[in-house]
Image (cartoon, rainbow, N blue to C red):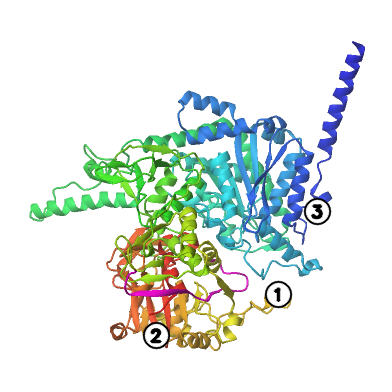
């Protein structure tokens, strides 16, 4: 008995000693990195950060390190989970609770409240997404250390009541940026300037615009944790830099917010924002600005923060100043007046990196403190918002938006006109504000509200069907997978079914709106209705935060049917997060195979066939059921091998014909060059990504390569994206004026030799003549967006259509008359032309203040210039915001022009935008394959 007690005592002492030793062994940042986080002129690399996170995980039972997957450059992306030891042992239970409450399915109110009482607040904190914003990754390191090492009452309460997901959002970027900064041995010479390439392999800064599409591996890793695994109640996305004259911009944000949100989401953002600014005020940290104090709103989807809103998650963004190189808070006098946007202004002063780290840690603690004090409320509220979405999608529901309010006003105005006419000029309808029964707060009669908001035709949809027999079903499946990656509930038909008299084949996909993430479903299928937002009546427009419209189903060219009533069928639920694969077919071959030019994957298959040595031809008229420009592949053993693999891997539909069609044009691969610039162009990076996805081989070329000449001996086609070719400042409003002019590029001698060959810009004296020679010798040039200004440099017979006469001079239309930020517009085209093979007669394009042209009639008549895309009416807006869109009617927004033996293709819309616009990829792909008569 004595021995047993003694053994127990020794065991207890051993365990306590081991636990104490483990707690004491948590390494400080300085012990690991050799400097304190926030020290001047010091940055940590991702390699060092990864090693530190591993040390923290090994040293503390408050942690669990999770491998999220590989980055685009092959690094492991980690998530460090921090909580109390007891919570760490029960993570799976708390994850299940978080999932159940977020999905809001199959539970009563009482069950939801019980789970909310049992669960822990799940809080996401990330850093480093934009790698040159160095505060983000470094505050993550410092916050992790403090949460793991501190023992104060607040920290212990946070650990007991919260599960903190600490996510590094861009490992590749931190490695590049920190190594670049630290390459100088003398600290004072260190700089973040002139980074030689994008800090995300393809997207650079656009990695924060990929979250509804999930093209990038980092995005996929993050989305899986956010929307499939954990579904946190709050996520906090760190960025910089704050507006000049402030330290940090954060929640609450300015209007407009997206109309599909639950109102509880907006008030929850306000509440957490209040906790954040209060914490800084208590700690004497000035300079927080909110609402109209910054440009950030909650309208856009697609950002790491903003996509969370469409999933009922309280998404937070802060933009803070600071750099490892000491900086200044500049004097901005108007920022020094306290107001609702900036109640505690910061005065001009020297600013140090450590100050930004301290602010960030305080803001993290403010969020965590709020989450733990309102833990059960946050957990219940995400359920409540999800339940509200399910209820709205299960019945007739009319969401409010500007177009519906406009419809109410129009109904009232039409009624007044009618009454005026029928009463001989005397209006009998009561004016708004007259009061009386059946009115809304003294406004116009309620019948006008009812005429719109109770009209069965204007109800929100109950669901969507994507038929499996559409021409480009693999792209439709890509769209479905974009939904799946963001946690949307999808169903798949196990057999043929009929809805409202239309038959749908087995394999069709169904997306209903009676689900927790209804806001995201509507946002991906339905048009965005951005308000007319002006600084004051008659004044200039207020630019939206990023895009105004982006409806993904439109941009991808997906065919779907929209239903206002509920429907049912042999639908099988797709498990959350389970990616889908299209199943293709290959008909029994006779003379050969036919690949539909309407399907993007057909171009991938053609590239593989050509690489295998198979013959491929284009069919001008197509075949029954196939679009013009479809591909004919003669039967052969090589062709069968490639086709079979493409059917299995890509889901292509390989048709067949009994005999070789007439009028075929042989297809051959072209030598492709893609323009890029020192530091990296994001639009070019996205095209590089697209080329890799669809197996187009391309060289990346820089201005010095163009200036060196002999382009035709090296390439058949050169692709230029927006920003590549400046406009002609000398040609005023009738041309693309300004645009940055010409210059010699970067001349910093500290740039390593391996990157010096990338410096420079397209110039008028060297580059343009070489491009003209390339065209005249038979080359093709594809220009997209603002690079279409090459047409003006070549003095082609085209002019800017968006101008007006002012004092006898052509000038661009002012924003008060014409303004179209990023939105979806519809254009017309002739799909029998080779440049537009495979496209429908009406096509949705992404338009962002894009070029629109008038073509010289005699040049069109001669065929030297051909319109490719044009606006047939005065209302082309499909999604977003288009002020003054009537100016577009009759304008041409894409054309091709003969230059010597070659061809210039000018596409004004962003046909490859962020690798989201699958519906217009063919406008590029068609120009990348050679055909001969």
Helix, strand or loop status at disc 1: helix
* Quadrant occupied by the C terminus: bottom left
Q: Which residue is mark 1?
A: 754
In the image, taking residue 829 as reference, residue 207 lies left or right, namely: right
Q: Residues within 10 Å of mark 2 (few under 14, many from 20)?
A: some
Q: Label for residue 171?
A: none
Mark found first going from the N terminus, 3 or 1: 3
Residue mark closest to the camera, 2 vs 1: 1
Helix, strand or loop status at disc 2: loop
Residue 675 counted in the magenta span: yes
Q: Is residue 911 above or below residue 36?
A: below
Residue in the picture at 83% in, 54% down: 34
Q: Is residue 361 above or below residue 41?
A: above
Pick whichever, 915 or 873, lies toward us. 915
Mark found first going from the N terminus, 3 or 2: 3
Residue in the picture at 42% in, 70% down: 926
Residue 899 counted in the magenta span: no
Q: Are discs 3 and 2 less than 8 Å apart at CB?
A: no
Mark found first going from the N terminus, 2 or 1: 1
Q: Residues within 10 Å of mark 3 (few under 14, many from 20)?
A: some
Residue mark closest to the camera, 3 vs 1: 1
Q: Which residue is mark 2?
A: 796
Q: Which residues are magenta?
A: 660-682
Q: CA distance from mark 3 to mark 1?
A: 29 Å
* Quadrant occupied by the N terminus: top right
Residue mark closest to the camera, 3 vs 2: 2
Is residue 280 visible in the rendered image? The answer is yes
In the image, taking residue 42 as reference, residue 716 lies left or right, namely: left
Q: Are discs 2 and 1 less than 8 Å apart at CB?
A: no
> Where residue 353 sits in the image (x, y, percent)?
72, 57
Q: Label for residue 33?
A: 3
> Where residue 877 sits in the image (x, y, percent)?
34, 61
């Amino acid at each position: 008995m004595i021995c047993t007690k003694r053994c127990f005592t020794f065991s207890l002492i051993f365990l306590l000693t081991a636990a104490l030793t483990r707690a004491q062994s948590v390494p400080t940042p300085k012990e690991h990195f050799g400097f304190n986080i926030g020290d001047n002129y010091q940055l940590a690399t991702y390699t060092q950060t990864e090693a530190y996170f591993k040390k923290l995980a090994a040293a503390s039972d408050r942690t669990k390190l999770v491998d999220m997957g590989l980055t685009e450059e092959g690094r492991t992306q980690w998530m460090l989970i921090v909580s109390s030891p007891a919570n760490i042992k029960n993570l799976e239970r708390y994850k299940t609770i978080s999932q159940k409450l977020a999905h809001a399915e199959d539970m009563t109110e009482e069950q939801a409240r019980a789970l909310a009482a049992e669960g822990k607040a799940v809080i996401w904190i990330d850093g480093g997404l934009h790698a040159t914003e160095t505060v983000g990754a470094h505050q993550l390191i410092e916050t992790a250390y403090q949460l793991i090492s501190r023992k104060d009452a607040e920290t212990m309460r946070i650990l007991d009541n919260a599960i903190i997901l600490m996510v590094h959002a861009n490992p590749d970027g931190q490695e590049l940026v920190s190594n670049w900064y630290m390459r100088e041995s003398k600290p004072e010479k260190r700089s973040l300037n002139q980074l030689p390439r994008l800090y995300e392999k393809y997207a650079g800064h656009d990695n924060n615009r990929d979250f509804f599409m999930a093209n990038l591996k980092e995005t996929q890793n993050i989305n899986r944790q956010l929307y499939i695994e954990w579904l946190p109640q709050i996520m906090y996305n760190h960025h910089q830099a704050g507006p000049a004259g402030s330290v940090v911009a954060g929640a609450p944000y300015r209007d407009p917010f997206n109309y599909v949100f639950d109102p509880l989401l907006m008030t929850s953002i306000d509440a957490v924002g209040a906790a954040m600014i209060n914490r800084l005020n208590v700690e004497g940290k000035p300079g927080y600005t909110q609402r109209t104090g910054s440009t950030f709103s909650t309208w856009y989807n697609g950002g790491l923060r903003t996509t969370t809103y469409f999933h009922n998650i309280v998404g937070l963004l802060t933009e803070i100043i600071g750099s490892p190189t000491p900086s200044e808070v500049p004097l901005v006098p108007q920022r020094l007046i306290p107001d609702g946007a900036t109640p505690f202004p910061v005065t001009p002063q020297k600013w140090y990196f450590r100050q930004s780290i301290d602010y960030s840690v305080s803001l993290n603690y403010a969020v965590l403190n709020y989450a733990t004090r309102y833990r059960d409320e946050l957990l219940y509220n995400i359920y409540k918002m999800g339940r509200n979405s399910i209820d709205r999608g299960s019945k007739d529901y009319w969401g409010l938006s500007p177009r519906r309010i406009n419809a109410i006003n129009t109904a009232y105005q039409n009624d007044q006109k009618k009454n005026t006419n029928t009463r001989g000029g005397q209006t009998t309808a009561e004016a708004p504000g007259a009061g009386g029964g059946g009115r809304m707060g003294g406004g116009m009669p309620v019948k006008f509200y009812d005429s719109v908001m109770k009209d069965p035709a204007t109800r929100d949809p109950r669901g969507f069907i994507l038929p499996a027999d559409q021409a480009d079903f693999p792209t439709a499946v890509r769209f479905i997978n974009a939904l799946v990656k963001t946690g949307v509930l999808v169903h798949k038909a196990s057999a043929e079914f009929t809805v409202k008299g239309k038959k749908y084949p087995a394999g069709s996909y169904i997306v209903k709106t009676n689900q927790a993430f209804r806001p995201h479903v509507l946002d991906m299928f339905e048009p965005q209705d951005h308000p007319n937002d002006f600084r004051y009546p008659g004044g200039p427009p207020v630019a939206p935060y990023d895009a105004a419209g982006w409806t993904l189903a439109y941009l991808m060219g997906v065919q779907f049917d929209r239903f206002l009533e509920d429907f049912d069928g042999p639908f099988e639920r797709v498990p959350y997060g389970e990616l889908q694969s299209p199943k293709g077919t290959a008909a029994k071959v006779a003379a050969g195979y036919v690949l539909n030019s309407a399907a993007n994957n057909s171009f991938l298959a053609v590239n593989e066939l050509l690489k295998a040595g198979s013959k491929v031809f284009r069919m001008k008229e197509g075949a029954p059921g196939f679009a013009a420009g479809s591909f004919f592949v003669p039967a052969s053993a090589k062709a069968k091998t490639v086709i079979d693999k493409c059917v299995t891997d890509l889901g292509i539909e390989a048709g067949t014909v009994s005999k070789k069609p007439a009028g075929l044009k042989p297809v051959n691969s072209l030598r492709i060059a893609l323009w890029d610039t020192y530091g990296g162009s994001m639009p070019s990076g996205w095209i590089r990504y697209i080329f890799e996805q669809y197996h187009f081989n391309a060289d990346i070329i820089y201005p010095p390569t163009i200036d060196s000449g002999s382009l035709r001996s090296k390439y058949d086609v050169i692709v230029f994206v927006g920003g590549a070719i400046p406009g002609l400042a000398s040609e005023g409003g009738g041309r693309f004026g300004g645009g940055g002019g010409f210059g010699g590029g970067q001349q910093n001698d500290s740039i390593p030799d391996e990157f010096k060959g990338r410096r420079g810009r397209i110039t008028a004296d060297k580059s343009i003549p070489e491009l003209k020679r390339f065209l005249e010798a038979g080359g093709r040039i594809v220009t997209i967006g603002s690079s279409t200004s090459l047409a003006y440099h070549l003095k082609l017979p085209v002019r800017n259509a968006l101008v007006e006469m002012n004092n006898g001079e052509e000038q661009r239309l002012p924003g008060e008359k014409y303004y179209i930020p990023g939105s979806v517009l519809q254009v017309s085209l002739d799909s029998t032309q080779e440049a537009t093979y495979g496209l429908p007669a009406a096509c949705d394009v992404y338009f962002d203040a894009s070029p629109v042209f008038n073509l010289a009639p005699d040049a069109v008549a001669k065929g030297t210039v051909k319109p490719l895309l044009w606006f047939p009416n005065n209302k082309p807006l499909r999604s977003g915001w288009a002020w003054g869109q009537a100016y577009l009617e009759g304008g041409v927004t894409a054309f091709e022009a003969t230059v010597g033996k070659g061809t210039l293709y000018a596409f004004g819309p962003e046909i490859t935008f962020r690798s989201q616009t699958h519906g217009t990829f063919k406008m590029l792909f068609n120009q990348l394959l050679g055909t001969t008569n």
